[in-house]
Amino acid sequence: MRPHFRLAALGAVAALTVAVVPVSAATSPAVVYRDAREPVERRVADLLSRMTLDDKIGQMTQAERARVTDDPGLVTQWRLGSVLSGGGSAPTPNTPESWTALVNRLQEAALATPLKIPLLYGVDAVHGHGNVPGATVFPHNIGLGATRDAGLVEKVYAATAREMRATGIPWDFAPCVCVTRDERWGRSYESFGEDPALVTLLGGSAVDGLQRNGVVATVKHFAGDGDTEPGTGDSDYAVDQGVTVTSRADFERIDLAPYAAAVARGVHTVMPSFSSVDWTEDGAGNPVKMHADRELLTGTLKERLGFAGFVISDWEAVHQLPSASGGAEPTADQVRAGVEAGVDMFMEPNTAALFQERLRAEVLAGRVPMSRIDDAVTRILRVKFELGLFESPYATAGPIGTPAHRELAREAVAASQVLLQNTGNLLPLSPDARIYVAGRSADDIGMQSGGWTVDWQGRDGDVIPGTTILDGIRSAAAEVTFSADASAPIGTSDVGVVVVGETPYAEGFGDVGSAPWSHGTAGQREPKSLTLQPADRAVVDKVCGAVDRCVVLIVSGRPQVITDQLAGIDAMVASWLPGSEGAGVADVLFGAKPFTGRLPVSWPRSAGQVPVNVGDDDYRPLYPYGWGLRT
């Protein structure tokens, strides 16, 4: 898989966005690691033999863009192996040209080190390259899960890779191959579904889409983050970063299965979860943080599954590990625990220098063996060589949001729509019908895109280019009246279409039961729930009570319980978080394309029924896993 990946990456890079700028003496036969004709493993061994301890620790360090942008010399000084942009961290102006200039400036600093080792730049592009306004924003994974189409998912992630490379970025912290088992978790929409078989199928396709197009994929969050117990969350969250209480057999079957398949497919990086695992075999009450779990990171992932890439920590994740040594974080024993467990590169956004100081002291004191350092650096260098980064370290800007990619996104949106109810075969609608559209989600591209869109937690409002669901309806129907709060007269409208759902959120703050994100918009500060907000319920009741026929579209990252309102609703659609191409929703509403989506998660009868998953002994959801009517 690795040679195939490298050839594909080099082809994509040369053809699309990367200018081949050779490193000095790139083909000198006297320096094996600079000779692209040599086998990767020989190049890695040669380079490793030339590296000092500081060189090696530098490769194990990842800092945040904001920390080094104003002083790229820090990249050289710290000999950084990687830089990332966290959610919402972008250059000004936020354009492909600015991104490539940024990456190249930092790359130049990396190549000023004695051994000229290029850095690897990474971002979270979890539903398209949503970090950059103008990029194509695809449906979140939960919507892609509803398509059940592995070929389509590969195309979506391939397009994401091409737009990432057009901004100079070759590493994606995606796909999330978590198996969501409780919709109260605020990252449910990052999962392809509740069934490990579905997640395994589509997660593998996502990896292929990225890596066959020159972008390093990261499967995350290893493992069990979608299976944690409510009330056990860390960092003041209700569910996120919590504890997975499970038997080893269930963990293997549910939580580990997608990772085993991704490793077999050749994925190059794995990100551990903030969460912990508590095995039931030895009694509950002794959870181990994943970033300190040597049994799983080294014993299972690297040794049993044969993972040959490198493990990248999550954001300051080792800071959550128990510590007895005191001092500023990361402490010495936190760093030591992470390295010993099997973490190879450490995401230390603002504490890179302190991390390096701690690790250097641990190695010199003999508490961390050099063999472990060499193993970590070997893995990191292997990925960089296979990517072709030594031969092509610099990037040039390219196109994003192309018509072809937007058409692909519209296709994915249409395929993701799940028709839950269709009394009297109301759908598809006639283009000649007089349509009354209401609901706050109808004409809000930020709401329909969700979290990880420009900002970490997303943002409602007019945040990216694209088409809203209302735009799509107006293009398909001859007569449309719109009133977000249904205050405009409904008059003689034939059909009401009510578009309601959740405001954007991401990890932690999206948990049901967590405190809202205080920095968000007014809408984002509303409490997260498995039921519609009161104002949304009121609009549904008002419109559906006033028209003869009524359609409700639910725009959300998880099911919204609406059981008590079903009697007044003729047709209901789970629209998920469609992204920038809302016209795809109108395509199925008006019959340009058929409804084919199927539920990737069970739709509960009540909030109290959650968690409910296919295979449960007492399985009686409102709509079962796999449900989806056809037109």
Image: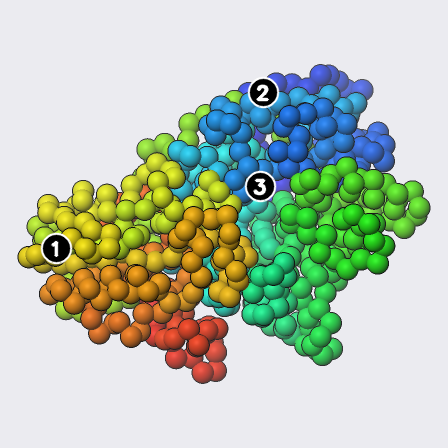
- Secondary element under disc 1, as helix, strand or loop, is loop
What sort of colour scheme is used for the picture? Answer: rainbow
Q: Position of residue 398 (x, y in %)?
A: 45, 25
561 in relation to 93, above or below = below
Q: Quadrant of the C terminus?
A: bottom left
Label 3 environment density (alpha carbons within 10 Å; few <14, some 14–19, many ≥20): some
- Secondary element under disc 2, as helix, strand or loop, is loop
- Secondary element under disc 3, as helix, strand or loop, is loop
Q: Report the side of 403 relative to 479 (left or right).
A: right
Which three-letter amino acid code belongs to the residue tagged 2?
Val
Find disc 3 in the rendering and name its residue. 86
Q: Report the side of 226 relative to 64 (left or right).
A: left
Residue at image coords 72%, 24%? 73
Which three-letter amino acid code belongs to the residue tagged 3?
Gly
Find disc 1 in the rendering and name its residue. 489
Label 2 environment density (alpha carbons within 10 Å; few <14, some 14–19, many ≥20): some
